[in-house]
Amino acid sequence: MQEAALMAGRAFMRSLSRPLYLREIMTQMDLIGVGSLLIISMTGLFTGGILSLQSAKVLTTFGATSETGLLVMTSMVREMGPVLTALMLAGRVGSAIAAELGSMIVSEQVDAMRALGTDPIKKLVWPRILALIVMAPALTMLADILGAFGGWAVSSQLMHVASSVYISSAKEALTYNDIIGGLIKPTCFGLIIAIVGCRAGLRTHGGTVGVGRSTTQAVVTSDILIIVADFFLSRLILVFS
Amino acid sequence: MSSAAPNAIEFQEVTLAYEDRVILDRVSFTVGHGETKIVMGGSGTGKSTILRLVLGLIKPNSGRILIDGEDVTNYSDRQLTHVRQKIGMVFQEGALFDSLSVYDNVGYRLAEKSVPDSQIEESVRRMLQFVNLEEAINLMPAELSGGMRRRVGIARALVGKPKLILFDEPTAGLDPPTARTICELAMKLRDLEEVSSIFVTHRIDDIKIMASAFFSYGENGQVEFQREDDRLCLINTQFMMLKEGHVIFTGTDEELWTSKDPYIQEFLRSD
């Protein structure tokens, strides 16, 4: 934990000194953001659909199917969107970061980088941290929007809830606190995925077996930390709202 | 008052241990300017560790390491930046950056310093010409053979004209002709460019060629390969043998071949 905090601290402190590695940052944003569009879109769309399906069924019992939109949006924006997006990113991006940096360690590329006068924290870690703390909220927003759409599609087509009813109740559900909270969470989750992935990768030892171990460690640790952090962030956001 | 220039590298009683495993035990040696120190020894004797200590990639437990007379033992990565500018390192497997082309690998050091593209291209082409790999300029590392990767590694190490080159078993696993090409590149640097170097190897063939031949400029400025005969002694090439983290021999090739040490005799007979 201490090492991870030190690594993140060093990355932030050195981020403003030259060279800025803008090309590296853009490449990482492309790989992480654009590269994850499909899986995040599918996750958001079908999660919204599932939420709509399950909640409409329960709400029918109480004659409150008109509140389906509210339930879907609240769940998506507050919890499902940020958490599922982060878990998907941990699986896709966190593992890729650990594997890439781990391979660079075992093939001495990181040593070569240091020998050539480059700071690996600045060149390798900082672009990935920045890309994830920017792209995770953006992808979460996309998941939320597609989740709302998926919820609408299911509630209107399968559960026969009028579109106007769904949309008005969905609008009702959204408050500024929800939106802000829904963006704070993925920023923190993005930071967790980047730091855990980079640390696991840079601490790789034991050849190709070590790379596999680092990759697994990065995903498992990120997933656990995301769930734990979600609890504390939810509590904090509820207190302040 | 002495006005002698400091050594390119100086190790003073350097000790390195991981927990209770001693890698280097009070190792001392010097590498003069323009000198090639050939470091030999079996696997796990601490040969590559010496190169990592020179670069500051790892720190010793005790002792001092001096580069050009400057004590760099406790320098941070940031403090080491200007020291590393003077050093080129050729890694065992090349350690080329997989995501970059040969051009970008070789020009990496200059690109990091924001040197104009035209200068980078000129420098990269010159270095690739030196290692006879101009045709590979646009290839990716995955498309190169083992020998080509080492030569690209040498070209990358030479960009920026470092006065000190570290070779970490650059001929390991290569076929004899390719290994000889690599040795000849190291010899050209030694004889024509007066670059100081540490050449880590356990191949007897490398030792034989590097200790028995040299390059010089002919009357018309052409590069000539010459054999050392009885009248010559390559004083710019010294040998050092490591055994279990200890230096058990330093001297010339003539002294090495006539050494009575059983370990050295066994080592020289083994290839």
Image: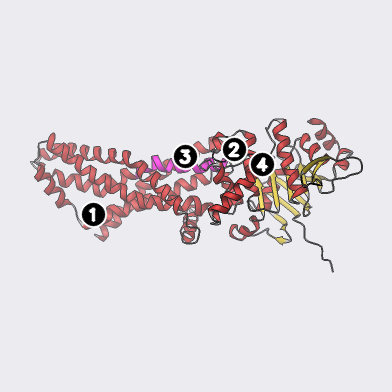
Q: Are marks 4 and 1 on the same chain?
A: no
Residue labelled with disc 3:
A215
Residue labelled with disc 4:
B131
- Residue extending farthest to the front is B220
Helix, strand or loop for disc 4: loop
The percent coordinates of residue A34 (x first, y second) are: 35, 44
The percent coordinates of residue B238 (x first, y second) are: 81, 46
Decide: is A114 above or below B241: below
Instruction: From the viewer's perspective, tell me whether residue B45 is left or right of residue A31.
Output: right
Q: Real-space Cα distance between discs 3 and 1?
A: 33 Å
Residue labelled with disc 1:
A178
Q: Chain of mark 3?
A: A
Helix, strand or loop for disc 1: helix
Q: Real-space Cα distance between discs 3 and 2?
A: 37 Å
Q: Chain of mark 1?
A: A
Q: Real-space Cα distance between discs 2 and 4?
A: 11 Å
Residue labelled with disc 2:
B135
Chain part drawn in magenta: A86-106
Decide: is A162 above or below B63: above
Task: Please tell me which residue is depicted at 68% across the width and 39% down the height of the picture.
Answer: B170
Mark 4 surroundings: few (<14), some (14-19) or many (≥20) residues within 10 A:
some
Is residue A89 on the magenta stretch? yes
Q: Chain of mark 2?
A: B
Helix, strand or loop for disc 2: helix
Is residue B23 on the magenta stretch? no
What residue type is disc 4 on?
Answer: Val
